[in-house]
Amino acid sequence: MKMVRTLFGGLMMAAALNGMARADITVSTATDPTALLGSQMSALLGTERGALRDLPEARLAAIATGPEAPAVRP
């Protein structure tokens, strides 16, 4: 009888945990955190592309190459 009660208790616990896991999945898919981020990222990259397009060629080359490395003495 004790074994049956232990088995039944384990099955009830597994059923309860399974329900909680499904609730977590349901809640996390109900609100899509990437939906707003995608449009904001597109707007940001579009603004950056426009700003880079307006730069003079020499300034764009300086940004692309970066600063000169200091000379290292042996």
Image: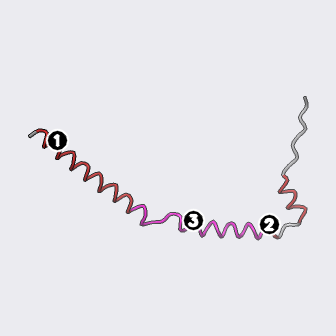
> Dividing the image into 4 quarters, which one contains the N terminus?
top left
Q: Find numbered disc 3 in the image and state the secondary structure of the residue it sits on.
A: helix
Percent coordinates x, y for residue 71 in the rendering: 90, 38
Name the residue: 70% across, 70% down: 46
In the rendered structure, find residue 19 and report the number of the disc placed on it.
none
Q: Find numbered disc 2 in the image and state the secondary structure of the residue it sits on.
A: helix
Identify the mark nearer the N-term, 1 or 2: 1
* Amino acid type of the residue tagged 2 in the rendering: Leu
* Residues shaded magenta: 27-50
**Mark 2 vs mark 3, CA separation in Å:** 22 Å
**Mark 1 vs mark 2, CA separation in Å:** 68 Å
Which of pointers 1 and 3 indicates the residue nearer the eye? 1
Q: Find numbered disc 1 in the image and state the secondary structure of the residue it sits on.
A: helix
Q: Residues within 10 Å of mark 1 (few under 14, many from 20)?
A: few
Name the residue: 29% across, 51% down: 17
Name the residue: 90% across, 28% down: 74
Residue receiving disc 2: 52
Write down the quadrant of residue 28 in the picture. bottom left
Q: Tell which of 59 and 9 is nearer to you.
A: 9
Write down the quadrant of residue 43 in the picture. bottom right
Q: Is residue 11 left or right of residue 49?
A: left
Vertically, is 61 above or below 74? Answer: below
Percent coordinates x, y for residue 26 in the rendering: 37, 63
Q: Are marks 1 and 2 in contact (CB under 8 Å)?
A: no
Residue receiving disc 1: 6
Q: Residues within 10 Å of mark 3 (few under 14, many from 20)?
A: few
